[in-house]
Amino acid sequence: MGYAEVTVVQGDITQQQVDAVVNAANRRMRGGGGVDGAIHRAGGPAVLEDCRRRFPHGLATGDAGWTTAGDLPARWVVHVVGPNHAAGETDRALLVSCYARALAVADELGARTVAFPLVSAGIYGWPRQDAIDCAVATLAGTPTTVEEARIVAHDAATAAQVRASLSE
Ligand code: ADP
């Protein structure tokens, strides 16, 4: 097993032409705001149906699991549940786990290209710079068969911050 090449683009995660996109889900896995809302809107009802069927009890914080990607260009959605910093979940190991578990699930699926949002950096309020550093270090340092781990930053300032973290 090797290591993924970590890349960054500015854009919308739902539009990525990759094998799998990662969703910043919540424990219930029944949809939400931010990336979760965008993925369910663009993926259509098949994503929610598969969430209900495969994860009737949802997912634990720090864990990952896959569903169909419905109408998205990707083939799979890998759902992860980031720690809710805003609600007092500040254990960084849980955020590291989201990226490591997502890569492990992508390995099981045989996904070679995977797009990641900055998990927990939105509604869940994880400090931006640390969320970026955690994504970059974990994606670059975890053995995997994924070839490209693409970090999708929603805005230009965040994309620049990810690029800076990547070149450190
Ligand atoms: P969480 O609840 O885990 O904090 P969010 O979805 O609220 O997750 O936000 C995670 C990050 O994804 C934030 O940096 C947010 O700006 C960004 N984001 C929101 N929508 C999209 C999108 N459609 N594509 C890529 N990134 C997005």
Image (cartoon, rainbow, N blue to C red):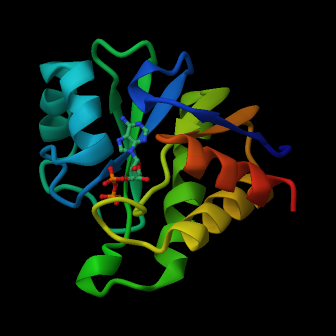
In the rendered view of the protein, which quadrant contains the N terminus?
top right
In x, y percent, where is residue 110? 61, 27
Up/down of 160 relative to 107, above or below: below
Left or right: 5 as drawn, with respect to 124: right
Question: Relative to 156, does residue 83 appear above or below in the rendering?
Answer: below
Which percent across, then down, holds residue 109?
Answer: 54, 30
Q: Where does the image place residue 37, in percent across and percent down from the top left?
A: 21, 38
Q: Which residue occupies 54% across, 79% down?
A: 93
> Closest to the observer: 161 or 108?
161
Q: What residue appears at the point 38 percent right and 64 percent down from the top-left corner? A: 82
Q: Write the residue at 63% across / 67% down.
A: 134
- How many marks are shown on the rendered structure? 0
Residue 101 vs residue 137, the one in the foreground: 137
Q: Is residue 57 left or right of residue 63?
A: left
Residue drawn where x is 29% and y is 31% of the image? 39
For residue 41, which quarter of the picture? Answer: top left
In the rendered image, which quarter is residue 166 located in?
bottom right
Q: Depth check: give the residue in front, 22 or 63.
A: 22
Q: Position of residue 150 (x, y in %)?
A: 64, 36
Q: Quadrant of residue 22?
A: top left
Extreme residue toward the front, this view:
157
Is residue 132 left or right of 39 when viewed as pictured? right
Q: Quadrant of the C terminus?
A: bottom right
Is residue 6 shown above or below 82?
A: above
Residue 46 to residue 139: above or below: above
